[in-house]
Image: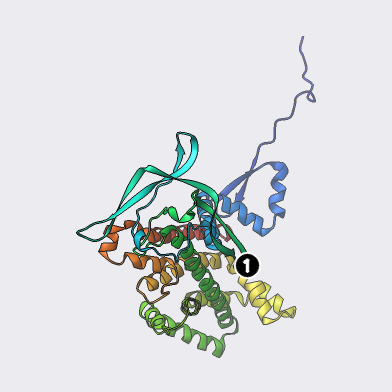
């Protein structure tokens, strides 16, 4: 006797995930009931989905986020006033933080004892394991203002002692006894902001002048292109050195900071300007540009609303690659004494302390600002590569 199977009694197979091709990254496995969302998703969401596939770029985005947070709130992450000096505290070695003791989780650092060598007359420091300095989170320290408005004295780390936060030196001290960790936190704000501000200004000039040159052509194109050729024919390093060296010595730190930012941005826009011009020469006769012109759109609206968005991926790549270049430019100018000068604090100013072999031999931790430059530059380059691939619809 044969049996028949009721087709309604057999459950249907579970729907398999449908691989959907994504530009530049292969495929995304999306369930069929959600595949329709891919075709109605806005552009920013498509870019985000593509960007998440680049795991290394996501990690670098996290690193850059931490660096930006440090740059926004350097006082919160500092241990003491970065300008506070102490003749008896020079060249204190790095103090390592131990997070566990016999009582469990109880962060502390060992104390240091110093004595001046009778022959070399320099301070020699030794770790004193019999003396422990408890470390506390969100400890009270020197007063400061958040964004110059909100007064507070709370710091991320501090010593739980009556003397305050100045007893801990996570990255040691320099020849004047200034805490290197605190100075590195404040140097992050200056060096990073110079790169960001200079790149924003150079990107704006490159898009504006390059777009005008490529869209209008004629005598305007001739003048802008000759200006670009003039700037590109000048050797950059001597020009930077000459311009920064010409700054008046009596200028304040803020004036020097603003002047260096302007100098870096005025020299760094030429390459992008020529690239934008070449792109606009190819786009100005496209159908969507002609349609916008016939619809009565203004010239600036056509440039910034219709033509510039087609270069989004390239502009992102250029921006993220230009920021490290600007940071390096400021660093080596300040390192040579031609950029920011003390009492300003930047990565280049901090590296000035490591200009001689004696400082490197006595305090190798003075080179750590160079490591911060390397990490920031590499992270920005990888992040830019991931953003470029994610934002490019033709990749």
Name the image quarter holding residue 201: bottom right
Drawn side of residue 93 relative to residue 281, left or right? left
Mark 1 sits on what residue?
149
Q: Residue farthest to the front?
A: 162
Drawn side of residue 55 relative to residue 305, left or right? left
At which x and y percent is residue 248? 42, 85
Residue 386 in sight: no
Residue at 26% x, 63% y is: 357
Residue at 68% x, 77% y is: 301
Front residue of this view, candidates 151 and 360: 151
* 300 over 387 or under it: above or below: below
The number of callouts visible is 1
Name the image quarter holding residue 24: bottom right
Label 1 environment density (alpha carbons within 10 Å; few <14, some 14–19, many ≥20): few
Identify the coloring.
rainbow
* 266 over 91 or under it: above or below: below
Front residue of this view, candidates 211 and 373: 373
Drawn side of residue 290 relative to residue 347, left or right? right
At which x and y percent is residue 60? 50, 54
Q: What secondary structure is marked by label 1?
A: loop
Residue at 38% x, 59% y is: 173
At which x and y percent is residue 38? 68, 51
Q: Quadrant of the N terminus?
A: top right
């Amino acid at each position: 006797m044969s049996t028949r199977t009721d087709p309604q009694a057999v459950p249907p197979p579970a729907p398999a995930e449908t691989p959907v091709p994504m530009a530049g990254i292969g495929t995304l496995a999306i369930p069929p009931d959600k595949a329709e969302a891919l075709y109605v998703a806005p552009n920013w969401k498509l870019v985000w989905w593509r960007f998440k596939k680049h795991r290394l770029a996501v990690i670098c985005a996290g690193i850059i986020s931490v660096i930006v947070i440090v740059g926004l709130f350097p006082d919160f992450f500092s241990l003491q006033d970065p300008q506070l000096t102490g003749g008896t505290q020079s060249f204190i070695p790095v103090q390592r933080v131990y997070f566990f003791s016999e009582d469990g989780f109880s962060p502390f650092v060992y104390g240091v004892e110093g004595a001046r060598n009778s022959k070399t007359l320099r301070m020699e420091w030794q770790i004193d394991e019999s003396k422990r300095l408890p470390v506390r989170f969100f400890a009270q320290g020197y007063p400061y203002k958040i964004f110059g408005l909100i007064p507070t004295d709370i710091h991320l780390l501090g010593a739980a002692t009556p003397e305050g936060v100045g007893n801990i030196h996570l990255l040691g001290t320099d020849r004047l006894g200034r805490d290197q960790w605190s100075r590195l936190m404040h140097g992050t704000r200056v060096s990073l902001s110079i790169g960001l501000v200079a790149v924003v200004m150079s990107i704006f000039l490159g898009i504006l002048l390059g777009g005008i040159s490529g869209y209008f052509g004629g005598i305007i194109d001739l003048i802008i292109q000759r200006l670009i050729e003039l700037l590109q024919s000048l050797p950059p390093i001597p020009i930077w050195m000459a311009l920064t060296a010409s700054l008046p010595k009596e200028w304040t730190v803020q004036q020097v900071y603003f002047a260096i930012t302007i100098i870096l941005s005025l020299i760094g826009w030429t390459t992008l300007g020529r690239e934008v011009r070449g792109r606009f020469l190819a786009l100005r006769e496209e159908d969507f540009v002609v349609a916008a012109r016939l619809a009565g759109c203004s010239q600036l609206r056509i440039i910034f609303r219709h033509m510039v968005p087609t270069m989004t991926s390239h502009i992102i790549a250029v921006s993220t690659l230009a920021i490290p270049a600007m940071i390096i430019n400021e660093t080596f100018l300040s390192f040579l004494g031609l950029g920011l000068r003390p009492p300003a604090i930047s990565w280049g100013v901090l590296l000035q302390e490591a200009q001689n072999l004696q400082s490197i031999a006595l305090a190798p931790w003075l080179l750590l600002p160079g490591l911060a430059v390397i990490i920031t530059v590499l992270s920005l380059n990888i992040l830019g590569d991931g953003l470029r691939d994610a934002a490019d619809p033709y990749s």
